[in-house]
């Protein structure tokens, strides 16, 4: 299929050379239209067609419409083959100049790709994610698979949510439930962490757990809230195991667990934000309804961002005014950790070119240096002449 039609009869010629392949679909550029992409399913199904039709008729509001930015990769048209009524995919807005959110909260990647993205931008990104989720929840949509791979961010901290066709929602007219069937480890709350439970109804509390994990990543230098330093015997548990056990790094249930040494201090966060994290990861462990809503996060992050102050030593260091004049980023540098937001950004070093496997796998024969052999011959000849002269 290289040419498809939408339900209004408009033609879309797919660029088969620019394709992103996934497990269920392929994403194409559209020739002559750089503002959209076409997502075409490998095995189109009637249930998915019905779901897309409902989504197209009931889109959420766009919180970033004034910035002329799309907060969601939402379906804007349904695609069909010629002479067929079956829906095989959909058209969605194309985002330019955006990267996965992990590229920003990972300090090493951030320094290489977007060094100006300081802590204020990180907090604004978290606020924008919370605002988008709040709007979705108000319209009855549940993301279901909240993770870093579905959140893309611009250099100006604007956010776009991808894979919207995997969202869960219930048709208000028929009561039919459209499920989300995917999950991501590290973002699955303890009450539904058992593997294989993909065909069950999601709750808004699952989204709120994933939201808090993303916010923690953004505010704590990419550290997972359940990534702990393990001081016990045997193999350390991974983050999802700690989620199940309730081992929030800043409220460990035993002396075997402590915060990661490279993580910023929890006290660096505004008191209100610390309270929300405790509500989500501690109170919410047994009582999911105790987790803060997306709107609570949005409002708290907005207030915290307004209370940020600038370091007197480094204008790229932002921190909460509850810390006084003690810059936590300078304190990390004094601990011989790399500066998260350096005053002077070093130009990126060129990456070494990979060697072809057939050349790298075989040790080459040593090459002979002709100059070295000439010098050796001259020295040898002089020694012979000295021996003859001595006789």
Image (tube, helix red, strand yellow):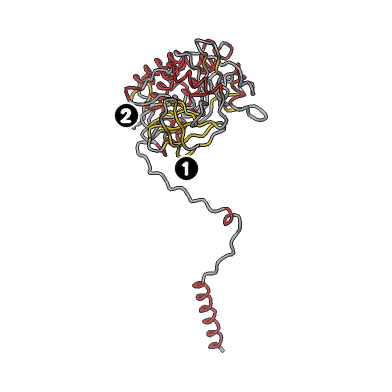
Please tell me whether mark 1 or mark 2 is closer to you in this view. Answer: 1
Q: Secondary structure at mark 1?
A: strand
Q: Position of residue 335 (x, y in %)?
A: 46, 33
Identity of the residue drawn at 50% across and 75% down: 375
Residue on which the image places disc 2: 312
In which image quadrant can residue 67 be found?
top left
Name the outermost residue toward the front: 83
Q: Pick the quarter of the image with the C terminus.
A: bottom right
Q: Which residue is mark 1?
A: 17
Q: Residue furthest bottom?
A: 391
Residue 362 lies in quadrant: bottom right
Which SS class for mark 2? loop
In this rendering, does residue 263 appear at all? no
Around disc 2, counting alpha carbons within 10 Å, would you say few (fewer than 14), some (14 to 19), or many (20 or more)?
few
* Nearer to the camera, 54 or 157: 54
x, y percent for residue 122: 40, 27
Considering only vertical position in the picture, is 333 above or below 176? Answer: below
Residue that lies at the very extreme toward the right in this rendered image: 234
Which residue occupies the foreground of this view, 326 or 172?
172
Q: Position of residue 145 (x, y in %)?
A: 53, 23
Between residue 4 and residue 109, name the one nearer to us.
4
Q: Quadrant of residue 363?
A: bottom right
Q: CA distance from mark 1 to mark 2?
A: 51 Å
Residue 71 in view? yes
Which residue is at 43% across, 18% downward?
Answer: 59
Task: Tell whether label 2 touches label 1 (CB within 8 Å).
Answer: no
Question: Considering depth in this image, is 83 or 53 the residue closer to the camera?
Answer: 83
* Within-10-Å neighbours for mark 1: few <14, some 14–19, many 20+: few
- Tell me where residue 96 appears, x and y as whole percent: 39, 34
Please report whichever mark, 1 or 2, sits nearer to the chain's N-terminal start. 1
């Amino acid at each position: 299929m290289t040419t498809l039609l939408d339900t209004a009869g408009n033609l879309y010629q797919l660029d088969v050379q620019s394709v992103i392949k996934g497990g269920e679909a392929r994403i194409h550029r559209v020739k002559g239209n750089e503002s959209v992409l076409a997502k075409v399913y490998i095995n189109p199904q009637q249930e998915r067609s019905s779901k897309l039709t409902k989504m197209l008729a009931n889109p959420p509001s766009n919180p970033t419409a004034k910035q002329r930015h799309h907060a969601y990769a939402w379906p804007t048209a349904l695609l069909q083959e010629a002479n067929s009524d079956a829906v095989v995919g959909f058209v969605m807005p194309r985002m330019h100049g955006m990267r996965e959110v992990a590229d920003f909260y990972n300090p090493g990647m951030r320094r290489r790709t977007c060094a100006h993205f300081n802590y204020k931008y990180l907090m604004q990104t978290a606020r924008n994610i919370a605002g988008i989720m709040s709007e979705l929840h108000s319209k009855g949509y549940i993301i279901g698979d909240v993770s870093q791979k579905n959140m893309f961010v611009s250099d100006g901290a604007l956010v776009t949510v991808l894979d919207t066709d995997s969202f869960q929602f219930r048709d208000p007219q028929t009561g039919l439930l459209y499920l989300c069937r995917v999950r991501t480890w590290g973002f699955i709350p303890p009450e539904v962490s058992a593997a294989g439970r993909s065909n069950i109804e999601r709750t808004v509390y699952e989204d709120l757990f994933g939201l808090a994990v993303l916010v923690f990543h953004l505010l704590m230098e990419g550290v997972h809230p359940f990534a702990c330093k393990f001081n016990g015997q045997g193999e350390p548990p991974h983050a999802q195991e700690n989620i199940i056990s309730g081992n929030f790094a800043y409220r460990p249930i035993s002396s075997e667990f402590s915060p990661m040494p490279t993580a910023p201090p929890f006290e660096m966060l505004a008191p209100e934000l610390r309270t929300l994290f405790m509500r989500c990861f501690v109170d919410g462990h047994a009582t999911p309804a105790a987790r803060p809503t997306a709107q609570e996060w949005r409002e708290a992050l907005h207030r915290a961002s307004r209370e940020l102050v600038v370091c007197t030593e480094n204008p790229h260091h932002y921190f909460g005014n509850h810390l006084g004049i003690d810059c936590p980023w300078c304190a990390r540098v004094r601990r011989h950790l790399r500066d998260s937001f350096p005053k002077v950004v070093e130009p990126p070093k060129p990456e070494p070119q990979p060697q072809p496997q057939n050349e790298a796998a075989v040790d080459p024969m040593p090459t002979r240096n002709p100059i070295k052999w000439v010098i050796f011959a001259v020295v040898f000849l002089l020694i012979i002449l000295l021996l003859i002269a001595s006789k």
